[in-house]
């Protein structure tokens, strides 16, 4: 039996160079908890926590700029963002893709579980839309565009 001829060009699967991860979630201070990070990681997400990079209380404009530069997908529980025009402008200027958890009266553990279940849809949105954008999602875990 004749051996299969190699093309001389390594395939993406056999390449030793690390491919950039374009789907990295960033938990802002409102979601920066062990339970949320653990739930998302168990669902296969790469997670960056605000406190891994910044001190608590860091102004939003500072971490938003970094999140945009790093192409991190921001997850927040800051429901009031829809009323804060300057924060929405800063988010859009940074080119951030954001998902705001608006489910009321749920524990942080339940929040992590809901976000983990919503992960496939969040990933699909991020693959199909370049941003900047803001989606909100409630207890159902169904992301809806916030304009």
Image (spheres, helix red, strand yellow):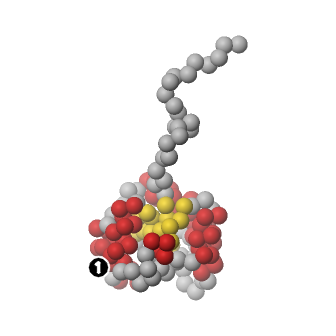
Camera-side residue: 69 or 128?
Answer: 69
Q: Is residue 79 visible?
A: no
**Residue at image point 40% right, 56% down:** 129
Q: Is residue 34 visible?
A: yes
Give the answer, above or below, for where 15 lies relative to 1.
below
Give the answer, above or below, for where 94 lies relative to 14.
below
Task: Please indicate whether residue 97 sits to the left or right of residue 39 in the image.
Answer: left
Camera-side residue: 119 or 25?
Answer: 25
Residue corresponding to mark 1: 86
**Residue at image point 63% right, 62% down:** 43
Disc 1 is placed on an element classified as helix
* Number of numbered labels in the structure image: 1
Task: Please indicate whether residue 139 sits to the left or right of residue 93 in the image.
Answer: right
Q: Quarter holding the C terminus? A: bottom left
Crowd tier of the residue under label 1, counting other residues whose Cα lies within 10 Å: few below 14, some 14–19, many 20 or above: few
Q: Residue furthest top?
A: 1
Q: Quarter holding the N terminus? A: top right
Q: Residue furthest bottom?
A: 105
**Residue at image point 49% right, 42% down:** 17
Give the answer, above or below, for where 137 lies relative to 104.
above
Picture coordinates of residue 45 (x, y %)? 57, 61
**Residue at image point 45% right, 58% down:** 126
Picture coordinates of residue 59 (x, y %)? 36, 80
Q: Residue furthest right?
A: 1
Picture coordinates of residue 125 (x, y %)? 47, 59
Q: Quadrant of residue 6?
A: top right
Picture coordinates of residue 57 (x, y %)? 41, 84
């Amino acid at each position: 039996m004749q051996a299969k001829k190699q093309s001389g060009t390594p395939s993406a699967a056999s390449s030793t160079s690390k491919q950039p991860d374009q789907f990295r979630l960033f938990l802002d201070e409102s979601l920066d908890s062990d339970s949320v990070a653990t739930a998302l990681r168990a669902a296969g997400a790469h997670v960056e926590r605000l406190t891994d990079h910044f001190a608590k209380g860091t102004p939003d404009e500072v971490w938003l700029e970094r999140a945009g530069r790093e192409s991190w997908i921001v997850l927040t529980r800051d429901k009031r963002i829809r009323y804060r025009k300057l924060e929405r402008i800063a988010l859009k200027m940074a080119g951030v893709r954001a998902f705001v958890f608006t489910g009321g009266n749920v524990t942080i553990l339940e929040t992590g579980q809901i976000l983990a279940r919503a992960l496939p849809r969040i990933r699909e949105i991020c693959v199909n839309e370049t941003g900047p954008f803001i989606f909100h999602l409630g207890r159902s875990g169904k992301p809806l565009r916030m304009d």
